[in-house]
């Protein structure tokens, strides 16, 4: 299934070594004619939580310059879009707004929650001393806290990403237990004119579902949600476009007839093939 991949990491991200040329080659091999790079920039990322001391700070000037040059080289056969995955926390909403203002030339901004109460759910300590469900619930609460003060993005990333790292994963995840908070999250996203993504990254990381859970996709649709992008969250070239056939069937099952691409932060709707 061919969708432009709208969630991709390259060597500009702290946690990826993927060369831009290899990402483009991989996309082309699959017949894609457009992708959007979304390298990590997590404002005030607490470096001490990462065992590898990763800082997730993006060198924006070099990133944009390199991608703009590549975009010119690839056009018109290949349409490269330039985005960022902006890691946000309730404490950094003001800085996130300024970041967006200062980078008006970006095509696309994914806002993502990676840090919860100073902890990274990627590490087992996040779930120590509490049930999986409590860890999941807190993740949703922090997204909601963030959204109450910050809606300057295009889509919110991997809404239930925390489940990827829960000791019981899907066996301890029942979205209905959290739907009150999830509803508030989705309502703010819809009312502010923004969207969410289908993120297939979990499917090749051992979790038998894409983010978010189909029940959340359906709820988003029921609340009037229309803006949706599809991304693999690939950190290596071979994962570009991974499981997009699955993303297509999830979107159709949830009642979507179109998906979005972005240029200069303006969405274009395309019929799901
Ligand atoms: Zn992310
Ligand atoms: Zn990502």
Image (cartoon, helix red, strand yellow):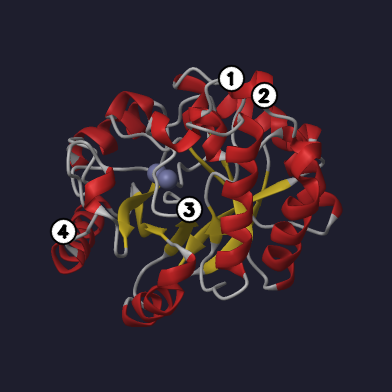
**Residues at badges 1 and 4 in contact (C-beta under 8 Å)?**
no
Tell me which residue sits at (59%, 46%) in the image.
159
**Residues at badges 3 and 2 in contact (C-beta under 8 Å)?**
no
Quadrant housing residue 149: bottom right
Instruction: Point out which mark residue 168 bears.
Output: 1
Q: Residues within 10 Å of mark 2 (few under 14, many from 20)?
A: some
Quick check: is the Cβ at mark 4 less than 8 Å away from ligand 2? Answer: no
- For the residues marked 4 and 3, what is the alpha-carbon distance in whole angstroms? 27 Å
For label 4, the residue is: 66
Tell me which residue sits at (43%, 78%) in the image.
97
State whether residue 24 is above or below residue 189.
above
Report the image quarter containing ligand 2. Answer: top left
- Closer to us: mark 3 or mark 2? 2
**Residues at badges 1 and 2 in contact (C-beta under 8 Å)?**
yes
Instruction: Point out which mark residue 113 bears.
Output: 3
Task: Locate residue 190 relative to residue 19 in the image: left or right.
Answer: right
Tell me which residue sits at (62%, 50%) in the image.
140
Tell me which residue sits at (53%, 38%) in the image.
162
Answer with mark 3 or mark 1, whichever residue precedes in sequence: 3
Q: Residues within 10 Å of mark 1 (few under 14, many from 20)?
A: few
For label 2, the residue is: 172
């Amino acid at each position: 299934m061919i969708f432009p991949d709208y969630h991709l990491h390259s060597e500009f991200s702290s946690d990826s070594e993927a060369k831009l040329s290899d990402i483009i080659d991989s996309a082309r091999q699959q017949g894609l004619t457009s992708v959007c790079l979304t390298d990590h920039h997590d404002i005030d990322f607490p470096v001490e939580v990462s065992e590898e001391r990763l800082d997730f700070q993006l060198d924006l000037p070099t990133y944009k310059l390199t991608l703009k040059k590549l975009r010119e080289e690839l056009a018109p056969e290949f349409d490269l879009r330039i985005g960022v995955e902006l890691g946000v926390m309730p404490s950094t909403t003001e800085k996130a707004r300024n970041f967006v203002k200062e980078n008006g030339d970006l095509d696309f901004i994914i806002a993502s929650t990676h840090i919860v109460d100073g902890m990274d759910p990627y590490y087992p300590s996040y779930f120590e001393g509490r049930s999986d469900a409590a860890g999941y619930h807190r993740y949703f609460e922090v997204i909601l806290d963030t959204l109450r003060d910050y809606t300057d993005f295009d889509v919110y990333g991997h809404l239930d990403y925390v489940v990827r790292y829960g000791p019981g994963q899907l066996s301890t995840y029942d979205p209905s237990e959290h739907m009150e908070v999830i509803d508030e999250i989705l309502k703010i996203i819809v009312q502010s004119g923004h969207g969410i993504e289908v993120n297939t990254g979990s499917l090749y990381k051992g979790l038998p579902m894409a983010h978010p859970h189909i029940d959340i996709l359906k709820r988003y649709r029921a609340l009037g949600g229309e803006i949706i992008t599809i991304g693999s969250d690939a950190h290596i070239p071979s994962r570009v476009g991974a499981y997009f056939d699955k993303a297509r069937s999830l979107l159709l099952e949830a009642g979507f007839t179109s998906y979005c691409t972005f240029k200069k932060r303006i969405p274009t709707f395309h019929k799901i093939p």
